[in-house]
Image: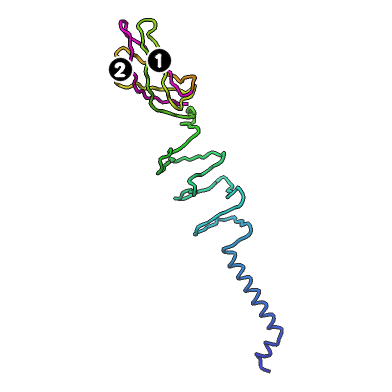
Amino acid sequence: MNPLKQFIRSKLTVQVIMTSLIVTIATAGIVLAVTTIGSDITTGGTLNVTGVTTMVNASSTLMSVGGAAGVFIADGSITDSTGAISFGSNNLTTTGASNFATASSTALATLDSLKVSSTGTTLAGIVFGTCSVDPQSIAVGASALVSTSCTASGVQSGDTVFVTPPADEVSTDDWLVFEGASASTTAGFIEITLFNASTTVAIDSAARTWSWMAIR
C-alpha cells in the first residue's frame, strides 16, 4: 500500500490534525491577549508601555494608584478636556514652582483661602478698587474729627481695609489729615476718618477718588 494512503487512513492522521488545531487556537488566543485583556494584571516588576495608554471605567473611580510612591510623570503634564482637574478633598503638595497661566480673560487662579508659609495667616479673600470720598465740612476745634463713608463693592464687615487718598487731596487741602479707615458694619462700604488740623478755618473738601484694598 502506498505509504501516503496508509498515513491518511491511520489514527495518527487524526491526532496530527487535532494537535494542529489546538496549537492554532492557542496561538490566536495569545496574540489576541496582546490587545485585549478581560481580567486583572498583576506584576511584581515594571510595566513598560511605549504606546498611548487609554484607561476608561464606567464607575466614579477612573484609576486608583496605591503605595507611597504615588504617580510620577516625567517631562509630561496632566490634561483634562474640560480644562479642570479635581483632587477631591486631598492636599496637592509640590516642592517645585507652581505656574498658572491662561489665555482667557478669566482669573488666573481662584483660591478659597491662601496661606504663605506654615506660620503665615490664612487669607480668605482680597478685593480692591476705587471709591468717591466726599466728606462733609469739618469745623475747627473739638469737632474737627469726622467720619465719612464710600461705596466699596465686595468689602465685608470685619475685613482689614487699606485706603490711599489721591495726591491732589493733600495739595489742595493743606489742613485735611487722613486718620484711618475700617470696613463698615454694613457690607459694601468703608468708613474713613478725617481730621481738620487747622485752628482757624473749617474745611469742606470736594469729592475725590480714593483707592482701597480689603483683606479678609
Reading the image, the residue beneath label 2 is: 170
> Mark 2 falls on what kind of element?
helix
The question of residue 24 being in magenta is answered with no
Q: Residues within 10 Å of mark 1 (few under 14, many from 20)?
A: some
The question of residue 211 being in magenta is answered with yes
Which residue is nearer to you in this view: 45 or 201? 201
> Mark 1 falls on what kind of element?
strand
Q: Position of residue 169 (x, y in %)?
A: 31, 18
Residues under numbered marks 2 and 1 in contact, where contact means CB atoms less than 8 Å apart = no
The residue at the point 60 percent across, 70 percent down is 28
Reading the image, the residue beneath label 1 is: 193
> Above or below — where is 1 with respect to 189?
below
**Image quadrant occupied by the N terminus:** bottom right
Q: Position of residue 83 (x, y in %)?
A: 48, 46
Q: Position of residue 4 (x, y in %)?
A: 65, 90
Give, as a three-letter code, the residue at label 1: Thr
Q: How is the image coloured?
A: rainbow
Residue farthest bottom in this picture: 1
Left or right placement of residue 145 versus residue 7 in this view: left
Which residue is nearer to you in this view: 78 or 50? 78
Q: Position of residue 73 (x, y in %)?
A: 48, 49
Give, as a three-letter code, the residue at label 2: Val
Residue farthest right in this picture: 11
The residue at the point 61 percent across, 56 percent down is 42
Q: Earlier in the sequence, mark 2 or mark 1?
A: 2
> Above or below — where is 8 with respect to 210?
below
Between marks 2 and 1, how big is the CA–CA gap? Answer: 15 Å
Q: Please provide the residue range marked out in magenta.
A: 187-216
> Above or below — where is 115 with respect to 145?
below
Left or right placement of residue 19 versus residue 108 in this view: right
